[in-house]
Amino acid sequence: MARPFTVIGFTMFFTLALVFELGQKAAVVILSAAAAAFIFSLFLKSVRRDFVIPTACITAVVAVLLSFAAALVPNEASENFNDSVHTVKASVVSLEEQSGERYYTELKTSEIDGEKYKLNIRLSSKSRLGFKPYDIVEGDLQLYDIGKTRDARNYYLSENVFMGGYAKGDINISQPERNPIGYYPLAMRAYIKNTVSRLIPGERGALAAALLIGDKSDLPKSVSDSFSSAGISHLIAVSGLHLSIWCLFILKIFDVFRLRRRAGAIISAAFVIVFMAASGFTYSVMRAGFMMLVMLLGTLLSRQADSLNSLGIALVILCFANPYCVMSLGLRLSFLSTLGIILGYSNIAFPLNPYIARVRNKYARRVCEFIFGSVRSTVLACAFTLPVMILDLGKVSLIAIPANLVSNLPASACMILSGLTALTAKFSFLRVITAGLAELSGVCASFLINSSKSLAAVPHSSLNASTFLFPLWLVLIFIVLAAAALIYKFSGRNTVRAAVLICTLTFAGVCVGSSALSRAATVITVADVGNGSAVVVSSGGKTVLLGCGGDSYYALSNIESAIDSVGADNLDFLLIPRVSEGESSLTLDVIDTFSPEYILAGETDADLNEILKTENYNLAPAADINIGGAELRYKTTNKTSTAVLGMGGADAVIVFRPSYAPETKGNILILRENLPHGISPENYNLTVLSAEADRAPAVMGKLLSLGADAYATGGQGNIRITVFPSGRILTERMLSLIHI
């Protein structure tokens, strides 16, 4: 077996991903199938000889057992501490970050209720508490399960967060007698962020900090959205690219000054470890870091490291450290992009190498090699990460390749310059150099911000990939590539070229078809916000939000997820059906995050101006509004508050005020936690209930007893309803609730 770690690492990664995606029942099936395949392989001499299949089977068994062991701690924590108050003593193990109107900090407990217990908690607060790295926190905390859905739970576990919590009363903050070793990476991270933000003010400094250490807490949403639409969001999530650039930079310095290569390898290895610490030990950086350390070790031992084996070793280390790491979006993108570059780089380079070699001027030849190398790396990375973009993000950038070609070089320059800025700022006699470096870094950041916004503004720059055509296309290309791999020995490179051509042409067809379907169909997403209403409607290229309330901890995240799932960055329209109770609790957060162009409040209230803090709204008890291909009719009275969405082939009735509602004909009925008088759910094709889990079962039971085809959010995820022009209704539960 030529590459044992490749087989072990890849098998472990994909097995754990399947187990956590499909659940423990699937784990039992995988375990049984792997054990049976291993026993069967022992009787086949040809299979037994290279030991690839037996190794993969053993690894799959180990991975399943590892997943069972990994689930023990969070399951035990949930049973013992969920929805209850406990006296906690813990250390601060992350920098305080702001999201919306709240602040979050990760704590690592040493004691719970006076007994030693290690548990990672995500502390939430309404105000900044001013934590410093490894401060000791003592007080009463309300603990709860931070992930109510499987996807949400897996995401937080991938971040080593087991539970959520908030303070019940005052908490005491003190400093430790002696700083532990974990203090210094966090302190360095805090120093870099504060220094870069101080010397490069505004959104330019926020972008420079994001490029350097991956801290996006101060980055405006408009900038992050433009990066996402342009397909370059990986630049502000520290990855292997950043680490590779730094290591190549260091090694190049050693080459220029004709210093010993091994000394450069040792310095680079030390830097890799420091960089992983400064970036917060993100999985994508650790993947690249372990690969880089293996390569540098090969340099020290005068041996050539194998890229695929190095990638496999990195995956094995990460999976044993935290099996839930496979649920990290960053690691998935990093792994697939690296795999694509490794597998395709030499094959794509081969046809053009003779032409590049004919360029006589060595500088021109190097420029050609650099340009072509950037193009092929970008193409390969985009191609291999496309499945994750479709399945996990539901969004595909159609300008990702040119956007990356334009942005990679200035992003690299900005990262290096901002890093040197933070380094030289330590020395007062270098203040002139520091100022110059900061200014140059700011210029690069400005270019990136302006270019990303310009690229994102290009019509059809990104495409909503949530239609059923994209998953079907992924199945098709899997079959095509599998067939190409089987007949490769007989047909050679022509088979690969034909497969690539088929995949490219079918992808273009899917993009055109999906765009047509998205614009023709109306998508209604009932966000899982607890007890309240938040309904996202997307039709004809416009996106609106009806209601912006809910008492769930995940309410805002789930609203963001619903809006992102239809490929929208901002809202065209916001309807606030009521000022009080649960229909407007997230008004300020929604306005701040999505900047709606037009706001309608359905009820007069003396405090409305203070709540909205904007003049861009109207007060009206009734309104008729066009939403792309749909017509919205809203009406509120003393007893009713109802919106009717006319979509040609079907109508949807949304009841906000749960007391009385007139009988309105429609195909879809969307309710809160109570059934209003005058509504007959059995007369509708579909009924969706927006209610917290503890209230949903009783109301659902009543709906089902009436013969209604009913769904409930109930803390289980958003409900998406797609209404096609023909009147056909497609209903699905959206479990990916975390905005990463």
Image (tube, rainbow, N blue to C red):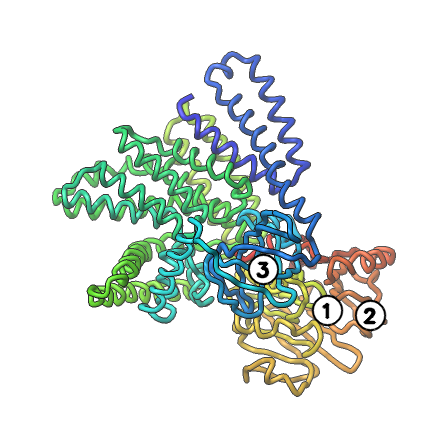
Mark 1 sits on what residue?
654
Q: CA distance from mark 2 to mark 3?
A: 47 Å
Residue 37 image position (x, y, % from top left): 59, 22
Q: Quadrant of the N terminus?
A: top left
* Label total for image: 3
x 60%, y 26%: residue: 34
Check disc 3: other Cα within 10 Å, few if <14, some if 14-19, many if 20+.
many
Q: CA distance from mark 1 to mark 3?
A: 46 Å
Q: Quick one: which residue is furthest to the front in this view?
A: 177
x 59%, y 39%: residue: 70
> Residue 676 got which mark?
2
Residue 321 image position (x, y, % from top left): 50, 39
Residue 677 image position (x, y, % from top left): 85, 71
Q: Quadrant of residue 289?
A: top left
- The residue lying toward the viewer, choosing from 367 and 410, is 410
Q: Quadrant of residue 247?
A: top left
Mark 3 sits on what residue?
138
